[in-house]
């Protein structure tokens, strides 16, 4: 069965510092992995995906994610955090007809 | 590109009353459609998904039901709401790729 885990409920980072939001996955076969962001009272917005190819995937708003097969991880990163990046972040893995989402990590960027 | 509409945006209903939430998709045909519920601003619970007109798969047994009367219309219903049905309901769509795109959501409060 496909699943992802987000080990941190909350991540705090100072504005201008690099940020990392962690995600590990468990799949049978090759994983299709995704990151989404959710602002308060809004739907989820697609940030980026890994299907195949380069392990470093670049997405929207300056975010990127690194696929690491040996560590079964797909961590979301940004070199310099903005206050406006404060939101809820979800990692997801594709199943046959659906995505399986993690429990979410709340990122707070402190001015 | 796809655009997903959901209405109403907010809804307050008494316990025992019926429910109808609507989702429509523009910019694509024959999409897969999904209903999720999000409680307390955290994890997503998949409720239903549909791969075509009249084809509904239920992920969680409960007092909700879904219907897909047209290719780009997905409806979530209940005959009698429970307090536990309160939450943020999200409609999502995929077409031609694995990532899901989400609507703006409906905030349902059952009183």
Image (cartoon, rainbow, N blue to C red):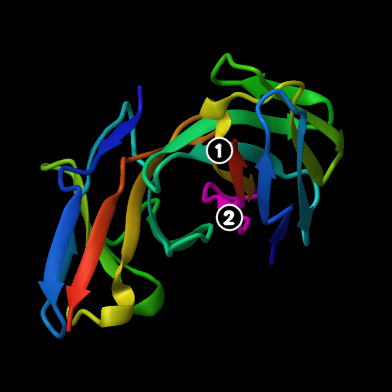
The spot of residue A86 in percent (x, y) is 29, 70
Which residue is identified by label 1? Answer: B36
Secondary structure, mark 2, is strand
The stretch in magenta equals: B94-106
Residue in view at x 31 percent, y 74 percent: A85
Image position, residue A42 (x, y; %)? 52, 61
First of labels 2, 1 by sequence position: 1
Q: According to the image, label 2 marks what residue? A: B101
Task: Give the residue drawn at x 40%, y 51%.
Answer: A51
User: As drawn, is A89 to the left or to the right of B29?
Assistant: left
Residue sitting nearer the eye, B5 or B78 = B78
Q: Would you identify the image quadrant in which residue B59 lies?
A: top right
Residue B53: horizontal and vertical position, in percent?
84, 31
Is residue A45 in the magenta section?
Answer: no
Q: Looking at the figure, which quarter contains the N terminus of chain B?
A: bottom right
Q: Which labelled disc corresponds to residue B51?
A: none
Vertical position of residue A58 compared to residue A70: above or below: below
Helix, strand or loop: magenta stretch: loop
């Amino acid at each position: 069965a496909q699943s992802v885990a987000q080990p941190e409920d909350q991540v705090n980072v100072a504005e201008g510092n690099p940020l990392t939001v962690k995600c590990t996955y468990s799949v049978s076969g090759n994983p299709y992995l995704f990151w989404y962001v959710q602002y308060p009272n809004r739907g989820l917005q697609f940030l980026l995906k890994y299907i195949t190819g380069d392990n470093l995937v670049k997405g929207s708003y300056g975010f990127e994610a690194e696929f690491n097969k040996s560590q079964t991880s797909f961590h979301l990163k940004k070199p310099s955090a903005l206050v406006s990046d404060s939101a809820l972040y979800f990692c997801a893995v594709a199943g046959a007809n659906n995505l399986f989402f993690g429990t979410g990590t709340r990122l707070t960027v402190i001015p | 590109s796809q655009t997903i509409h959901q209405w109403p945006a907010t809804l307050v209903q008494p316990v025992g009353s019926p429910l109808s939430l609507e989702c429509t998709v523009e910019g694509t045909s024959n999409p897969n459609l999904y209903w999720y519920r999000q409680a307390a601003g955290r994890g997503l619970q998949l409720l239903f998904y549909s791969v075509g007109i009249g084809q509904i798969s239920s992920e969680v047994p409960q007092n909700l039901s879904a219907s897909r009367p047209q290719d780009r219309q997905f409806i979530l219903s209940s005959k009698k709401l429970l307090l536990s049905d309160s939450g943020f309901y999200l409609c999502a769509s995929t077409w031609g790729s694995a990532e899901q795109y989400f609507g703006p959501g409906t905030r349902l409060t059952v009183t």
